[in-house]
Each structure stands twice: as structure tokens, then as C-alpha cells.
Image (cartoon, grey):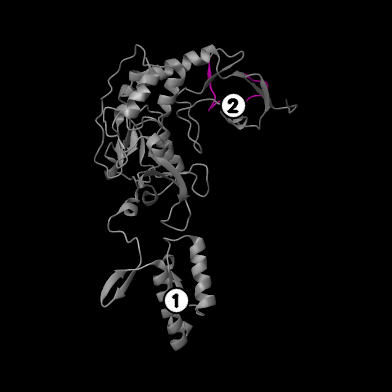
């Protein structure tokens, strides 16, 4: 309990808040769950999806928690019968407005359907590529929404397959606007926005061109923000279900910024890369290289052991052999010609810590200041 002048009651809990905080902010700060589909961390709230509606004592209508500022003395219920009924109705409309066959097909016997999907081949295109990591699916299961009596045209716009990295499946789009916010407010690329009106509304790039012909830089921020299967990585599509992959946290190696990423791995191969939304410095954002440029890891042409030239041919060697050879060569050159006869080039492809070690090695061991870095150029 708190005696702070600014307080709000959520599900019987009296909680303090700062001026300007929304109901959703206060709830999350106190580990009270209010589901959302359109709210994107770091972007302005819109209240578009209306999944976050809550009941305020004395109010005539339900209010959106993500966009409604907390007011002193508010008494909020997050799972009242009116709230649950509203969320289920909204989910039914969303399900019926798109090709969300996962929840509709499985609603009558969810457990049996889940087991069926687990046994299906990963490349079964009858199933949504985001099955198992779809926020809409999770909420439909939670509130037992099946699509109800609503029926709409689910194939108004064909899927866009021409882009090199991203599949845009408009039949699965719920028009939550998260991709638009990710592009315009988080990455500030301003490549996509809402287009057309009413039942014809869709997310468009430029004047409704494919992403490859627009200002899109393929950072993939929109893909990571999408809560359904409307935006998916092209190479990862139908490659592996989430429960068949291992998620490994690591640091992107493309530059010295140190972006934190997750590698999604199956059979010792990287299936896809996602940004770590909870860690600095990137908080989930990645560039096109960091998100999509991982094919080289599993390339058959990649060197996996050192090579030493013997009798004019490169022969595989152990790391001990290679390091001993390098050490002996550098020692001889330094002894014969001095440290300044040696130069060292470092790279933005390695970590800042490794560049620091290279700098110390050059100056303290080789006794030269001849060290440079590709970033200076």
C-alpha cells in the first residue's frame, strides 16, 4: 500500500504513479499483465488493436490502457467479464479478417491440434510460418477465440515474394501498425505507412511498390515488430518451428558497436537472427548485415583451420603450429630489422576488446606504433 498523493487502484492493488504514465505503464511496472497487440516499446501508443482495454469504475465504456494516462483515484479492473468479452470479440474479428488458420482450426481441440502441428513437416505451407511464436495465436488460445460468425475476404492482396530478405503476407496482416512504428519511429527510415482506406487499408511502401523498389534498407525492424505471420524472414520461412531451435545469445560481429543478438539454431546451423530487445546498445534493432548476413557461418568455402604454405601449397595445420610459426617469424623480423619494420592492421569485424589487445600487442610486444584500423579509412 502507498500513501503517495498520486495513486491508482488496479485489481484491488493501490499503486503509486508518476504524472504522465499510462495505465499500462503502471500495470507493467508492478508486474500486472495487460495484453496488447499494437503497443511497441519505444514508440508512441495508438490504442489501435483494442486488446489492452480495461474497465474503469464509473466510466461508461472500456478504455485502452496503453494510451490512457493514469489519473489519481482511478479504480481499474483488467480481467472483468466485460473486458474478457470485449477482447474475445476483438480477437474473433481479427481472426476472421485474415488467414489465421492456426487458431481457427485448432480451437475445438487445441491440445490435439498442437500435437498434430508438432508432428507436421516444417515446410508444410498450409500452416502459418509463425505458428508457435504468434502473439495473436497466444491471445486466441487464452481467450478461446475462434473467429466466430465473422467472415471477410482474406486474400484481397497477394503476398509479396520478390524481396530479397522479407516476405510480406498481407492475408495475415492485422493492421496493428507496429511495423509502421518500427520503421518510422524506431529506425526512422520512413519506408512504409498505412495506405488506402476502409476495407482496402494495407501497409504500403512508397506509392504501393515492393519493398525492394522503396526506401527500405532491409534492417528487418518491421519483421521483429510484427506480432503475427504477416512479415517473416524469407530464408527462415518454413525452416524450423520455434520449439525445434535453440536460442543462443551472442554479440554481432559485423562492426564494433556490439549489438546483442539471438541466434536461432537447428542442427548446428543458424536459421535466423533476432535482436535482443532487452540489452544495450541496440535494444533489439539491427542493420541488414546483422540480421540477414549470417550465411557465411555455414558456408562450405569457409576456412575452419589454419593453412601454412609448404613447398608452394597451402596445407592444413593446427592452431599451435600456426601460432608458433607466426611468433617465430615476427621475432626474427623484429630482431633483424627492428619493430618499426612491422605493421599491424586491425578490423571492425572483431570486438573492441580484441582491437585493444591488438593495440597493446603491437606497442608493447612488437615495440612499434605502426598499427591502423579499417574504420579510419
Q: Is residue 207 magenta?
A: no
Seen at 56% across and 12% down, the residue is: 60
**What is the count of numbered marks?**
2
Q: From this viewpoint, is residue 134 visible?
A: yes
Q: Nearer the viewer, mark 1 or mark 2?
A: 1
| Residue 174 position (above or below residue 260) | above
Position of residue 263 measured from the top left corner of the image (x, y, whole percent): 41, 46
Range of the magenta residues? Answer: 62-75
Q: Residue furthest bottom?
A: 336
Rendering quarter of residue 92: top left
Task: State the residue in front, 255 or 322.
Answer: 322
Q: Tell me if I can see residue 260 in this picture.
A: no
Relative to 90, residue 311 above or below: below
Compared to residue 31, the image places residue 234 above or below, namely below
Q: Position of residue 110 (x, y in %)?
A: 39, 19
Read off the residue under disc 1. 327
Look at the numbered disc 1 and give the secondary structure of its residue. Answer: helix
Residue 32: which disc? 2
Q: Position of residue 170 (x, y in %)?
A: 30, 30
Identity of the residue drawn at 69% across and 25% down: 7
Q: Callout 2 environment at 10 Å: few (<14), some (14 to 19), or many (20+)?
A: some
Looking at the image, is mark 1 or mark 2 earlier in the sequence? 2
Q: Give the percent coordinates (x, y) of residue 313.
A: 26, 73
Instruction: Name the side, left or right, on which 171 lies relative to 263.
Output: left
Amino acid at each position: 500500500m502507498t500513501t503517495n498523493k498520486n495513486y491508482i487502484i488496479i485489481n484491488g492493488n493501490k499503486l503509486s504513479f508518476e504524472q504522465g504514465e499510462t495505465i499500462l505503464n503502471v500495470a507493467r511496472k508492478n508486474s500486472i499483465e495487460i495484453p496488447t497487440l499494437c503497443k511497441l516499446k519505444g514508440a508512441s501508443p495508438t490504442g489501435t488493436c483494442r486488446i489492452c482495454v480495461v474497465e474503469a469504475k464509473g466510466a461508461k465504456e472500456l478504455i485502452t490502457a496503453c494510451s490512457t494516462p493514469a489519473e489519481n483515484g482511478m479504480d481499474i479492473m483488467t480481467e472483468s467479464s466485460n473486458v474478457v468479452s470485449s477482447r474475445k470479440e476483438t480477437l474473433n474479428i481479427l481472426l476472421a479478417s485474415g488467414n489465421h488458420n492456426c487458431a481457427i482450426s485448432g480451437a475445438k481441440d487445441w491440445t490435439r491440434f498442437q500435437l498434430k502441428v508438432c508432428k507436421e513437416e516444417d515446410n508444410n505451407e498450409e500452416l502459418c510460418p509463425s505458428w508457435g511464436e504468434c502473439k495473436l495465436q497466444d491471445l486466441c488460445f487464452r481467450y478461446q477465440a475462434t473467429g466466430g460468425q465473422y467472415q471477410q475476404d482474406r486474400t484481397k492482396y497477394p503476398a509479396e515474394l520478390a524481396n530479397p530478405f522479407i516476405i510480406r503476407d498481407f492475408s495475415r496482416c492485422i493492421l496493428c501498425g507496429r511495423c509502421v512504428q518500427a520503421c518510422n519511429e524506431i529506425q526512422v527510415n520512413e519506408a512504409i505507412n498505412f495506405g488506402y482506406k476502409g476495407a482496402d487499408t494495407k501497409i504500403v511502401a512508397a506509392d504501393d511498390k515492393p519493398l525492394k523498389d522503396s526506401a527500405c534498407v532491409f534492417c528487418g525492424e518491421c519483421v521483429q515488430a510484427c506480432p503475427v505471420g504477416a512479415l517473416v524472414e524469407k530464408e527462415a520461412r518454413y525452416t524450423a518451428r520455434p520449439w525445434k531451435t535453440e536460442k543462443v545469445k551472442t554479440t554481432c560481429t559485423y562492426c564494433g558497436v556490439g549489438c546483442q543478438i539471438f541466434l536461432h539454431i537447428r542442427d548446428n546451423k543458424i536459421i535466423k537472427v533476432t535482436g535482443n530487445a532487452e540489452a544495450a546498445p541496440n535494444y533489439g534493432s539491427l542493420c541488414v548485415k546483422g540480421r540477414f548476413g549470417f550465411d557465411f557461418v555455414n558456408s562450405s568455402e569457409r576456412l575452419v583451420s589454419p593453412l601454412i604454405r609448404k613447398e608452394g601449397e597451402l596445407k592444413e595445420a593446427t592452431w599451435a603450429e600456426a601460432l608458433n610459426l607466426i611468433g617465430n617469424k615476427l621475432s626474427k623480423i623484429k630482431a633483424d630489422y627492428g619493430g618499426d619494420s612491422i605493421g599491424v592492421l586491425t578490423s571492425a569485424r572483431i570486438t573492441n576488446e580484441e582491437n585493444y589487445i591488438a593495440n597493446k600487442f603491437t606497442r608493447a610486444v612488437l615495440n612499434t606504433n605502426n598499427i591502423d584500423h579499417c574504420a579510419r579509412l
